[in-house]
Structure formats: structure tokens, C-alpha cells
């Protein structure tokens, strides 16, 4: 299985490279290439994205949907993909918690959007803070992929978390995953494991860790789903808020961008993501607090499940709610407020006061 997975990694990189037509890579000092174009040329719709293979796959999917729905965007030069490096992409030897958490993968894109260097930004929604910079909106979510986590064991011989041998080393930078893993087996050792999907799989093949977890949505988008040993149910590993969802941001008053994004928006996904983000906002979520939350619409009813936990998995608080989809934000907010009260002030005070090193010490002891 690992050999075929390596082939898939190579194939995905080649596929990404072959799709780079109409792509511009730029740093913060970029001056728009539009200045070199004839003033009579139509202004392209500029799509801002990170440069990882997964981010590029999401940008290309956005481009495909735009061209599918708007024939004028199929013309040469009508769309431009603008690739940017974020702080989160450049610093890989520290955990997200140590670097300051949310916003690490979006700040540079926010600045480019507000500076009129790009017209829309494509994000993995789980990377987007619950607050947005003034002057920007996030009106569009593409139809959501499967939200579950994929479990990948070094030789494929272990298929469930409960069957992991004691003292197994798990590669993950996610406190959400770490806390749920350690609540199942406190002997597991979780180590910081960052980088793009291809980098993480190479580390697994090199024997750096025994297993890792990735969002199955990302593997699906790069046609690498066969790399997964198994796909975990919510009861075994509850996914992150907004996992599996792509969000597209634009400037508040940009009527052209808003017109395009209104057509692309998948309302069921948008409603569920709004519920989950309201839950996260109610908890004042940050990368020091393990938080998971997922909503789905079943038979016309909104079903939500959320949890918070201590980093070492020693305490875990869970909530489930149902209601009408039109009440999505209220459902998420109430669930977050319930857990905040259930866990108590001491729980959150401890999480705020703990340094990143203390939190990591709980995990790797």
C-alpha cells in the first residue's frame, strides 16, 4: 500500500504542475502585471491562494466552477491565479499553537485582497479565523467534501485508533486530534508533524512516526484517497470546525466578485459551516484549546455535535443539538455557550494561562 501511495504523491505533484497555466507567483512586493497590459484589455478576475498542492487543487476547482458557470471567464486572460506564501507555510518547525494559531494561513491573503492585488481568496475554511478583516466578506462555500479524518498507519496493518499499540508515535500538529487520541490511549506519543500532505506522507514512509491523520477531503481533492488506511467515524474522531469546506472571500463592495460567488455558493454547506463557526466563536476558540465541531443536515433537520478537551485527553466535554437549518447560527452559539458553562471557568482559565510549552508538555510527556 505504501508503494502505491508514493506513486499517488508523485502523480498529484505532476498533476498540479501541469495545471499551472495562468498562475502567477508573487511576494508582498508584487506590482500587478496588469500595469503591463493594454488599458483596453479586460481586467482578469484574480484568484488568491496559497501555493501548497492542496491549496492549488482548491484554486483550480474554483477556476473550473467559475468557467463552467460564466462563459466569459473561459476567454484567455479572464482568470488569473495568484500564489502567495503565508507565515504558516514558511515556518514548519513549530506547532501552530506556538506560532499564534489562527490567521497564519490567511493574513497575507487578507492584505492582498484589501490592497486590490487579488479579487477573491480561496481558503480551507478550517484555517479561517471566526473574525474577518473589515472590508471583506466570506459569502461563498463550495459544496463540501466528506468531512471525516483519514487514519494512515505505516504498513496498513492497524485500521482503528483503539488498536494502536501502546507507545505508538503519532504525527499531528492538531491538538484536537491529539486530545481525542490520548483519551483513547494515554500511552500514545504525539509529535509535531507539519508540512503539506506529500511531505507528511514522505515522513511516514521514512519511519519518522508510526501513523498520522489527515482530512480525507484533502486526499480526495488530490486523488490520493487510496493512501488512507481507514476513514474514521465522528464517534472515533470528531473533525475540526469547517473541515472539508472551501470558502471564498472577497471585498465587501465588489459587486463583480459577489455576483460570481453567489452562483457558486452551496447553501447547505454554507449553513453548516456558519453553525460550526458560531460554536467556535462562542468558545473563543484558539489553537491552545482542542475543539471539534460538525454540523450536517439530515432529513431537513440540522444535526450538530461538538466537543472541547484538555490537550492530554484527561477531560472531554461533549454536546449534541438538533434544530432547523435556518437557526444554524443560534444552534452553534448555544452549543458553545453550553460547553463553556459545562467545562467551567477553571478549565478555560487553565487553557489561557498555560504556555505552548506547557500544553505540549502534557502531550509528549
Image (spheres, rainbow, N blue to C red):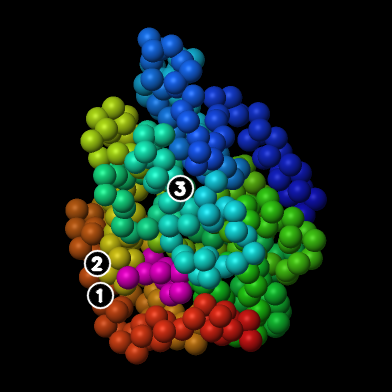
Answer with mark 2 or mark 3, whichever residue precedes in sequence: 3
Dividing the image into 4 quarters, which one contains the N terminus?
bottom right
Question: Nearest the camera: 225 or 208?
Answer: 208
Q: Give the image quarter of residue 293.
A: bottom left
Question: Nearest the camera: 159 or 117?
Answer: 117
Question: Residue 282: percent from the left, percent from the top?
Answer: 27, 69
Answer with mark 3 or mark 1, whichever residue precedes in sequence: 3
Question: Residue 344: percent from the left, percent from the top?
Answer: 31, 87
Q: Is residue 362 left or right of residue 43?
A: right
Q: Name the residue carrying label 3.
A: 108
Q: Secondary structure at mark 3?
A: helix
Query: Separation of disc 3 and disc 1 at Cα?
Result: 32 Å
Q: Name the residue carrying label 1.
A: 337
Q: Name the residue carrying label 2.
A: 333
- Asked whether the beta carbons under mark 2 and mark 1 sit within 8 Å of each other, the answer is yes
Residue under the point 52% across and 66% down: 99
Amino acid at each position: 500500500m505504501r508503494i502505491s501511495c508514493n506513486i499517488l504523491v508523485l502523480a498529484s505533484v505532476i498533476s498540479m504542475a501541469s495545471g499551472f497555466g495562468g498562475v502567477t507567483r508573487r511576494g508582498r512586493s508584487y506590482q500587478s502585471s496588469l500595469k503591463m497590459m493594454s488599458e483596453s484589455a479586460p481586467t482578469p478576475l484574480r484568484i488568491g491562494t496559497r501555493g501548497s498542492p492542496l491549496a492549488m487543487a482548491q484554486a483550480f476547482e474554483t477556476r473550473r466552477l467559475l468557467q463552467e458557470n460564466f462563459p466569459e471567464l473561459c476567454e484567455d486572460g479572464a482568470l488569473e491565479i495568484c500564489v502567495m506564501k503565508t507565515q504558516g507555510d514558511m515556518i514548519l518547525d513549530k506547532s501552530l499553537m506556538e506560532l499564534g494559531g489562527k490567521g497564519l494561513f490567511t493574513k497575507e491573503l487578507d492584505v492582498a485582497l484589501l490592497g486590490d492585488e487579488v479579487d477573491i481568496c480561496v481558503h480551507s475554511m478550517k484555517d479561517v479565523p471566526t473574525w474577518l478583516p473589515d472590508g471583506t466578506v466570506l459569502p461563498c462555500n463550495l459544496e463540501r467534501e466528506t468531512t471525516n479524518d483519514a487514519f494512515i498507519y505505516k504498513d496498513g496493518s492497524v485500521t482503528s485508533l483503539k488498536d494502536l499499540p501502546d507507545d505508538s508515535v503519532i504525527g499531528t500538529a492538531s491538538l484536537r486530534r491529539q486530545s481525542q487520541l490520548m483519551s483513547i490511549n494515554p500511552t500514545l506519543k504525539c509529535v509535531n508533524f507539519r508540512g503539506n500532505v506529500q511531505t507528511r506522507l514522505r515522513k511516514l514512509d521514512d519511519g519518522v512516526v508510526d501513523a498520522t491523520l489527515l482530512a480525507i477531503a484533502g486526499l480526495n481533492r488530490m486523488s490520493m484517497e487510496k493512501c488512507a488506511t481507514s476513514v474514521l467515524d465522528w464517534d472515533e474522531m470528531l473533525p475540526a470546525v469547517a473541515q472539508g469546506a472551501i470558502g471564498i472571500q472577497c471585498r465587501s463592495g465588489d459587486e463583480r466578485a459577489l455576483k460570481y460567488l453567489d452562483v457558486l455558493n452551496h447553501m447547505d454547506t454554507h449553513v453548516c459551516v456558519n453553525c460550526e463557526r458560531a460554536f467556535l466563536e462562542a468558545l473563543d476558540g484558539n489553537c491552545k484549546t482542542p475543539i471539534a465541531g460538525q454540523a450536517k443536515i439530515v432529513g431537513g433537520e440540522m444535526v450538530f455535535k461538538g466537543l472541547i478537551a484538555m490537550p492530554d485527553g484527561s477531560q472531554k466535554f461533549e454536546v449534541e443539538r438538533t434544530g432547523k437549518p435556518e437557526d444554524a447560527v443560534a444552534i452553534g452559539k448555544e452549543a458553545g455557550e453550553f460547553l463553556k458553562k459545562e467545562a467551567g471557568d477553571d478549565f478555560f482559565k487553565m487553557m489561557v494561562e498555560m504556555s505552548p510549552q506547557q500544553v505540549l508538555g502534557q502531550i509528549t510527556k
